[in-house]
Image (tube, grey):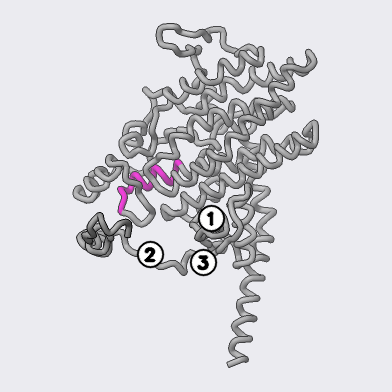
Amino acid sequence: MYTQALNQKDVAPATASAEDPERLARFEARVAAEDKIEPNDWMPEAYRRTLTRQISQHAHSEIVGMLPEGNWITRAPSLRRKAALLAKVQDEGGHGLYLYAAAETLGTSREALVEQLLSGRAKYSSIFNYPTLTWADIGAIGWLVDGAAIMNQIPLCRTSYGPYARAMVRVCKEESFHQRQGYEIMLTLARGTAEQKAMAQDALDRWWWPALMMFGPPDGESAHTDQSMRWKIKRFTNDALRQQFVDATVPQGHFLQLTFPDPELRFDEASGHWQYGAIDWEEFRQVLAGNGPCNRERLEARRKAHAEGAWVREAALAHAAKRRARRAAERQAAE
Amino acid sequence: MSETPMPIWEVFVRARAGLAHRHAGSVHAADAEMALQAARDTYTRRGEGLSLWVVPSAAITASDPADRDSLFEPTADKIYRHPTFYEVPDDVGHM
């Protein structure tokens, strides 16, 4: 559900100049004409690298994103809420798998992608390094985090790489339930007792700014925006999407009769947009650098799950190999 | 840590009786039975299908995109393969 424009610098040098200029021109003409690029098509190395990074980060985000919400499954306040949360977390797992499958079509194995996450080399969305302290956080995540993710993901359904675009269509179809269930939780709390309303307000206070950071650094600092836009990997800039999100979300928050933790938030009649105060980009950089409240805990949980599942993977492969061998022996005996 | 790679399978889903199976994505699994189980959990959580196929990815042979023109272009000038190529007077009625 959550891609984030993390805009890491490419480690490898830009090799566009080393590519066959004729093929590159043909590729760019196809993309410009809205033709989709498919796995076996020729593509510039930088396009492959950028997409592999973006899709796999997106997949990692889905998988790590299961952790903060999974934290509340056993403590959901009713069976209805529990069933919904369980289904939502299962969806996030599914979204991670669609995306890994899309990333693999670019030529990097699943094992290599997972290893990049577990070793800490690959990034995932900064938002999942914040803790879920109360039940209201589950509402705030659905409403704000999934809401921000949807803003980001709808344009990705038209991204130039076919397998990524198709995966995003599936993800977006499933995502709107996530946001609605979150908003329903917020609404219930906001209309509840004074204590419940305070919980909802506290969750909004803690999640609002991190949700705005999900769109990535401001356009001026965004290293890859130009090329990603030209190659139609990205369709809108970080700031444009962030503004869309603010405009959609602020009235929803007012309907809840909650207050946004931004004294500078005001509606600008002239532009028709909600204007928001300055984002603390130092916090964003710190969280991405591994210094957020839960970075270590999240990675430890993923490493533990991977290590504890190793025997299952080994046993499944051994079982399959044994059955194959037995079938081969039976065939031989029959001949 | 290098693990034995888990085989990869392409997943095809039949949405309704009467429709063909359609490619949905891929899964990793040790054997066909587990691939079907994984495909069910991954690609049919909301009644998307009534039937699943899983095929080892390596078993698929694909045409080369570089051959696209030589393979598919020649059909463009064979307009006599289409019914509109033939002239039938209006008086004959719908045919």
Three-letter code for the amino acid on which mark 2 is drawn:
Ala
Residue identified by numbered label 2:
B62
Query: Can residue A18 be seen here?
Result: no
Instruction: Provide residue A74's location: percent of width, then percent of height.
Output: 78, 38
User: Gap in Å between the C-alphas at discs 2 and 3?
Assistant: 13 Å
Are labels 3 and 1 on one chain?
no
Identify the subunit bearing mark 3. B
Q: Are marks 2 and 1 in contact (CB under 8 Å)?
A: no
Q: Nearer the viewer, residue A328 or A16?
A: A328
Describe the element under mark 3 as helix, strand or loop. strand
Task: Establish if A96 lies above or below A107.
Answer: above
Instruction: Provide residue A216's location: percent of width, then percent of height.
Output: 47, 28
- Residue B82: quarter of image: bottom left
Residue identified by numbered label 3:
B56
Read off the magenta span: A42-54
* Majority secondary structure of magenta residues: helix
User: Gap in Å between the C-alphas at discs 2 and 1?
Assistant: 24 Å
Residue identified by numbered label 1:
A111
Three-letter code for the amino acid on which mark 1 is drawn:
Glu
Q: Residue at x 54, y 60 (%)?
A: B18
Task: Establish if B40 lies above or below A8.
Answer: below
Instruction: Provide residue A248's location: percent of width, then percent of height.
Output: 52, 20
Label 2 crowding class (10 Å Cα cut-off): few <14, some 14-19, many 20+?
Answer: few
